[in-house]
Image: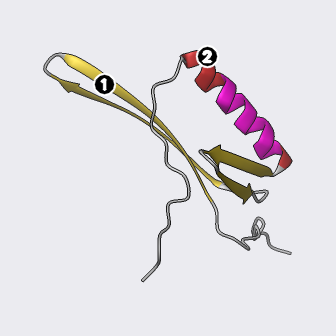
Amino acid sequence: MAQKNTLVKSKEWMAREDVAAFLQELGAKLAEDEVTIHQGGREVELSIPDRVKFKVKVKEKTKKGKTKHTLSLKLKWRDGDTPAGSISLG
């Protein structure tokens, strides 16, 4: 069975502008292919391959007349993955 290990987990209220700044910085680091995440005294370094699976999900849930919205962004990759390239016929 696969072993899962949570390296970083965070859930906090932030100003929209601060979230935007974090996402902009993350985008710049993704373009460079290396992302380092700091939390507490801990540091997690990620080497991002050229191709990743990118998932976007938007949900809404209404309960007692109040609507809750969720926007989820997820990147997935495996160590050592290399893109297979497009299929073609010769």
Q: Which residue is mark 2?
A: 17
Residue 76, position as x, y percentages in the image: 60, 57
In the orientation shown, which residue stands out farthest toward the front?
A: 41
Residue 18 drawn above or below residue 89:
above
Query: 10 Å neighbourhood of mark 2: few (<14), some, or many (≥20)?
Result: few
Residue 67 drawn above or below residue 27:
above
Q: Which residue is mark 1?
A: 68
Residue 33 drawn above or below residue 57:
below
* Residue at x 76%, y 67% (from the top left corner): 83
Check if residue 19 falls in the magenta segment.
Answer: no
85 on left or right of 11:
right
Start-end of magenta stretch = 21-31
Residue 60, position as x, y percentages in the image: 32, 29
What kind of residue is marked 1?
Answer: Lys
- The one of 21 and 78 positioned closer to us in this rendering: 21
* Residue at x 55%, y 18% (from the top left corner): 16
35 on left or right of 10:
right
Label pair 2/1, CB-CB below 8 angstroms: no
Residue 34, position as x, y percentages in the image: 79, 52
Q: Picture quarter containing residue 47?
A: bottom right
Badge 1 element = strand
Q: Picture quarter containing residue 61?
A: top left
Question: Disc 2 to disc 1, how far (Cα)?
Answer: 20 Å
Q: Tell me, for residue 85, which label it has, or none.
A: none
